């Protein structure tokens, strides 16, 4: 089975798929177009975006971008201004009441093939609502085009699975690009905690931002509003009875270093986060923590189904064809592909 067939088989296991990028110009829109073409005539698609996509030039860098081409009977959730810029014949299906700087998000159905522009909401809660609406119209799959550095868009609270896009625009050092991409995959793919007793304990205390859970499943709320400066309070309240440190928020290098630098009790305690999108950890700190016995698990599991690579940077350099793809393949079992080389017609 070739890589692209394997990828598409994995995609069909999920109802909604987000496409997220390590940086700008890593091939998110090209990846989206690839999937759209593969699904043409087979599946009914719903499309939306957390940023603005499909325009001929990037609104930030001014670089030329691939346009988004859809087939008849595609459902599209986009801002009103983008509807005017799209050249498909369309039928308005619904209005959402969700507003953006370029107009309300409207759901349309394409009555012809053609080019479209996508622009969606900036809040994850609104994105989830839109995905559910698109599914309710009979879409087999909902594809959500992400925004640069918005890896929270991969959260399983929003979509069922995600594709990570990376490429030369991340850095002109090919090894660094591969290393950062593989580390991102590691963070996004942390194991899901399977302790039902913990889940039940937390369900009754959903407002707790940072809390400790004992081996007897007693919950101790530390009454902290944000996790960013929580290491001191966490360390001061740890003892041998603690089984879990639960953090509903971001985990940073500073927090982890503050814990491992002041206690060894963390070796027997698992840190629990909502999912891998909450981890803003450098590879160095993450490796120090895990190799010294630390454990991080998620309440939810992110399904990373593939990695798209773009060896060409808009900043005037490119990597040898196939080299970045090859290096990343050495570090992951996920399908790794270059959609620029794929035959998508």
Image (cartoon, rainbow, N blue to C red):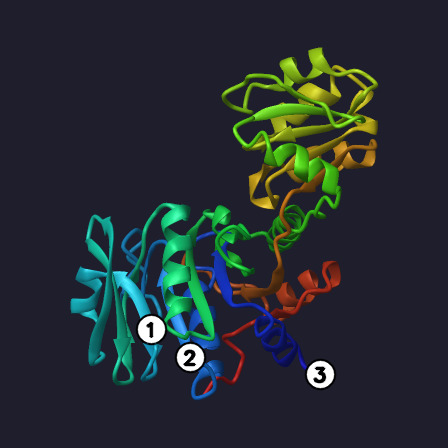
Q: Quadrant of residue 5?
A: bottom right
User: What residue is drawn where x is 53% and y is 50%?
Assistant: 155
User: What residue is drawn where x is 62% and y is 58%?
Assistant: 303
Q: Which mark is residue 307?
A: none
Residue 123, compared with residue 205, is above or below; it is below
16 displayed left or right of 214: left
Q: Position of residue 312 (x, y in %)?
A: 48, 65
Query: Gap in Å between the C-alphas at discs 1 and 3?
Result: 31 Å
User: What residue is drawn where x is 48% and y is 84%?
Assistant: 344
Q: Which mark is first along the chain, 2 or 3?
A: 3
Q: Position of residue 34 (x, y in %)?
A: 47, 76
Query: Hey, which residue is sitting farthest top in the picture?
Result: 236
184 displayed left or right of 59: right
Q: Position of residue 37 (x, y in %)?
A: 44, 81
Q: Quadrant of residue 71?
A: bottom left
- The mark closer to the camera, 1 or 3, is 1
Label 3 SS = loop
- From the viewer's side, name the closer residue of 293 and 103: 103
Circle 1 sits on which residue? 75
Circle 2 sits on which residue? 44
Quadrant of image for the N terminus: bottom right
88 displayed left or right of 288: left
Residue 327, compared with residue 45, is above or below; it is above
- Do callouts 1 and 2 mark residues in contact (Cβ within 8 Å)? yes
Label 1 SS = strand
Query: Gap in Å between the C-alphas at discs 3 and 2?
Result: 25 Å
Q: Which mark is first along the chain, 2 or 1?
A: 2
Residue 46, compared with residue 272, is above or below; it is below
């Amino acid at each position: 089975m070739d890589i692209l067939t394997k990828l598409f088989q994995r995609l069909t296991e999920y109802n909604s798929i987000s496409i997220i990028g390590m940086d700008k110009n890593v091939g998110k829109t090209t990846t989206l177009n690839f999937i759209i073409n593969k699904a043409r005539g087979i599946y009914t698609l719903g499309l939306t975006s957390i940023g603005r996509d499909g325009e001929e030039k990037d609104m930030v860098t001014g670089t030329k971008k691939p346009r988004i081409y859809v087939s008849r009977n595609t459902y599209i959730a986009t801002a009103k201004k983008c509807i005017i810029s799209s050249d498909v014949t369309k039928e308005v299906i619904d209005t959402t009441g969700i507003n953006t700087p370029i107009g309300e998000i409207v759901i349309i159905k394409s009555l012809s093939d053609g080019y479209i522009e996508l622009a969606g909401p900036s809040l994850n809660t609104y994105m989830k609502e839109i995905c559910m609406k698109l599914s309710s119209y009979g879409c087999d799959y909902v594809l959500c085009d992400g925004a640069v550095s918005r890896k929270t868009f991969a959260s399983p609270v929003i979509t069922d699975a995600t594709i990570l896009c990376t490429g030369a625009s991340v850095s002109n050092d090919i090894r660094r690009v591969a290393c950062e991409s593989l580390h991102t995959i590691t963070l996004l793919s942390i194991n899901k905690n399977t302790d039902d007793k913990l889940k039940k304990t937390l369900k009754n205390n959903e407002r707790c931002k940072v809390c400790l859970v004992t081996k007897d499943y007693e919950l101790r709320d530390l009454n902290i509003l944000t996790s960013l400066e929580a290491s001191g309070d966490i360390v001061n309240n740890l003892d041998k009875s603690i089984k879990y440190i639960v953090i509903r928020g971001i985990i940073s290098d500073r927090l982890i270093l503050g814990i491992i630098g002041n206690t060894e009790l963390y070796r027997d305690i698992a840190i629990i986060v909502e999912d891998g999108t909450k981890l803003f950890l450098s590879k160095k700190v993450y490796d120090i923590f895990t190799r010294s016995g630390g454990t991080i698990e998620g309440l939810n599991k992110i399904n990373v189904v593939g990695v798209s690579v773009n060896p060409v940077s808009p900043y005037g350099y490119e990597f040898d064809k196939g080299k970045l793809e090859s290096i990343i393949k050495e570090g992951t079992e996920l399908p790794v592909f270059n959609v620029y080389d794929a035959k998508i017609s």
